[in-house]
Image (cartoon, rainbow, N blue to C red):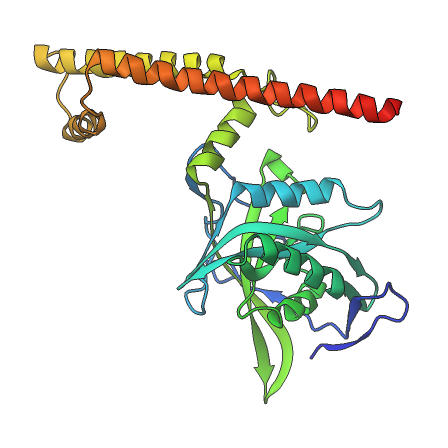
Amino acid sequence: PATTKPASSLCSGHLALVRQPPALQAFPASGVPSCGPPPRQTMAPGSQQNTLSGGDTLFIEEGAAKLVKVHPAVLFSILDHFIRRQEGQVRVIGTLLGYVEESCVEVTNCFAVPHSDKQDEVAVGQAFNKTMYDLHQRVNPKEQIVGWYATSMEGVSVVDSSSLIHGFYAEECADPVHLVVDTAMRGDTLGVKAYVSTPLTVAGIELANMFHQIKVELFSSEPERICIDRMIKGQKSPFTSSESLAEITEELHGIGVSMERLLGMIEVASSYVDKVIAGEVQADEETGRRIADTLASVPRIRPEVFDRVFNDNIQDLLMVSYLASLTKTQLTISERLNAAM
């Protein structure tokens, strides 16, 4: 089994893990051990909740966690950490924060943790991890440590050092989840996998750690979905460069675009209803229910009252924009006066 010792040759606050036990990965569903890395799955960020892992993988049905829901901000943070890694560093690791509900783990946040891989030892920034977790607790005390993440090493998700790092996080939380992001981008796809570990013991002696893959889903709230949609559609040429920035339109222009889209959807629904009444299109019960639910959710309000409420909101918006611009101007004048004095 793995043992620990102070990292004498490393920075203070690191924990050195030595005598690595091998890390074993569960076989594919066919029952034949795979000589290469397991097949990666494609992430489809367009929908609100997408499966990131599946295919012919045999998923474990025992243990505390059976499903991992990952928020988009977590994947962005992991990829940003990998892009900003030190020169010569093969992979990066970090701590996952979130919530545990029965057999589901929801990962809402994460932060990077410094580590060092050497021949027979792995050093993890234990003091740094504790400090960062304490700072996150001040902001959101409900978020707890639920596991750790790592990027793949040349397309391989689980390596021997994974068992030691997993053991370190097993002391931080019960049943930690190991999230692996495949940054090799083979086939122009982003593979995301999640694992739980169980020890393989013989006669009471731990010989290795068995990593079982569990299901992963991309889960986004309504604000996150809107933000991702703006990030993609706000670029002139999306996905052409890692430095591409999305343009944020002005508030009034955004309202105008939204109203145009709403008017277009209303015209499509109205045209469909007219064709159904005329007998040109066969009626669909599910579509009819959705249209009825949508109409029922619209409050009954007279046109003149709606115009007054809408104009009041526009005036409030313009007032806030004016006050923000005035505050910015005052701060700029104050900075220049302080610099001159």
Q: How many labels does the image show?
A: 0
Which residue sits at x=43%, y=42%? 50
Q: Position of residue 4 (x, y in %)?
A: 76, 76
Which residue sits at x=69%, y=69%? 164
In the depicted structure, whether residue 28 falls above or below residue 239:
below
Q: Which residue lies furthest to the bottom in this view?
A: 203
Horizontal relation, residue 220 to residue 12: left or right: left
Q: Where is residue 201 in the image (x, y as percent from the top left)?
A: 59, 82
In the depicted structure, whether residue 94 falls above or below residue 309:
below
Res 67 → quadrant: bottom left
Q: Where's the N terminus, which quadrant?
A: bottom right
Q: Which residue lies furthest to the front in this view?
A: 341
Q: Position of residue 269 (x, y in %)?
A: 23, 17
Is 144 in front, or is 270? 144
Horizontal relation, residue 17 to residue 31: left or right: right
- Residue 234 seen in the current view: no
Which residue sits at x=51%, y=31%? 227
Res 301 → quadrant: top left
Horizontal relation, residue 172 to residue 320: left or right: right
Res 329 → quadrant: top right
In the depicted structure, whether residue 252 falls above or below residue 86:
above
- Residue 199 seen in the current view: yes
Q: Where's the C terminus, which quadrant?
A: top right
Is 195 in front, or is 80? 80
